[in-house]
Image (spheres, rainbow, N blue to C red):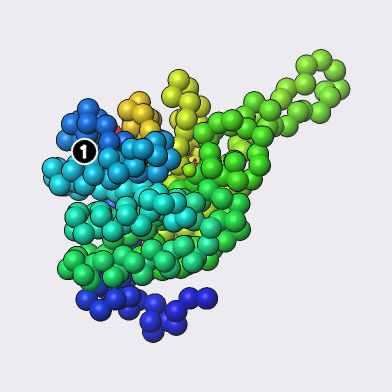
Amino acid sequence: MNRTPAKFYAPLATGAPAPLRQIPVKLERMIHFVPPHVEKIRSRVPDIISQVDVVLGNLEDAIPADQKSAARRGFIAMAEANDFGDTGLWTRINCLNSPWALDDILEIVPAVGAKLDVVMLPKVEGPWDIHYLDQLLAQLEARHAIKRPILIHAILETAEGVQNVDAIAGASPRMHGMSLGPADLAASRGMKTTRVGGGHPGYGVLADTGAAGGERPFFQQDLWHYTVQKMVDACMTYGLKPFYGPFGDFSDGPACEAQFRNAFLQGCLGAWSLHPTQIGIAKAVFSPDPAEVAFARKIVAAMPDGTGAAIVDGKFQDDATWKQAKVIVDLAQLVAAKDPERAALYGL
Ligand code: GLV
Ligand code: MG
């Protein structure tokens, strides 16, 4: 159960900033993961800031147990040392039932909470996880005079979390969005795979035997289609932002691009980049295609008030296609404001 409408937007601690009514409109095509305990990578953060939309200091999986506090300290150091401008600063804390999560929150928020945009919370199982972090963040914001609410981004990566995805999305006005975590989700579901996201050569459909006999083509299918769509529907219902998460095969750029593109077409706004090569892939996929933008602009121009019907390039348009076109034009404008090269491609 949630709070009553009257209390839903009230701060959860006296002196904490009021929750936002809307998620800030920001370009977040890639959430770039940095292991903050590695000094050499930390020294590259100024350069990374200029190339990505979001920098995330990862404290959870992939950070060895004996490096957890070094990663936490490293994150605080990198947050203090850099000016992030309009690039987002996020951290992925350890999951709530780990021995590290409490210290992650209690050390990071007082030190750099004023600079922190989003806390990514892994292995969220239900709204109770969001309520716990929500309350704790409000208490810390109040105690440390943080003026802007720190948002929560949930990773959807357990079977139970998928079952509860709507309740997670609606748990708090502090919710920013969600990412699909295909690696943990595969484990939690007992899937018979050994991968971080992407397809599987065994998952698909075999074409019927043709009348002429011969070879029967096999079509590989997207293992993540159902979950991505369920997550997108939950997020959009509550005004949150949906993301595809990680793609682990760094040697297969085209497969990463295909997975990101499926998510983009299904409604996602970005994905994680775990390797520098994936920054460019995410930028290309999550910025709308110039030809689509040109067509969308024609639709908007043909129906200036968004109602009625029109034929554009032989294709029927009405209020519903106008709304689709508007999604693409709005995103193109957001991209153009940050990226002069793409602004020129879009003619904006
Ligand atoms: C991400 O955290 C995943 O488990 O895929
Ligand atoms: Mg995970």
Count of numbered marks? 1
Q: Residue at x 32, y 60 (%)?
A: 151
Q: Residue furthest top?
A: 214
Location of the C terminus by quadrant is top left
Image coordinates of residue 109 in percent, x first then y, are 25, 58
Q: Vertically, is 298 above or below 48? A: below
Q: Quadrant of residue 291?
A: top left
Image coordinates of residue 81 in percent, x first then y, are 13, 42
Q: Vertically, is 144 above or below 246? A: below
Q: Amino acid at mark 1?
A: Ile
Q: Along the line of sight, which residue is nearer the eye, 126 or 165?
A: 126
Q: Secondary structure at mark 1?
A: helix
Q: Residue at x 34, y 67 (%)?
A: 136
- Is residue 137 visible in the rendered image? The answer is yes
Image coordinates of residue 299 in percent, x first then y, are 41, 49
Q: Quadrant of residue 134?
A: bottom left
Image coordinates of residue 129 in percent, x first then y, are 46, 62
Q: Quadrant of residue 222?
A: top right
Left or right: residue 330 versus residue 203 is left
Q: Residue at x 44, y 82 (%)?
A: 4
- Is residue 326 visible in the rendered image? The answer is no
Question: Which class describes the residues within 10 Å of circle 1: few (<14), some (14-19), or many (20+)?
Answer: many
Left or right: residue 221 versus residue 314 is right
Q: Vertically, is 241 above or below 340? A: below
Q: Residue at x 68, y 28 (%)?
A: 202
Disc 1 C-beta below 8 A from ligand 1: no
Read off the residue under disc 1.
49
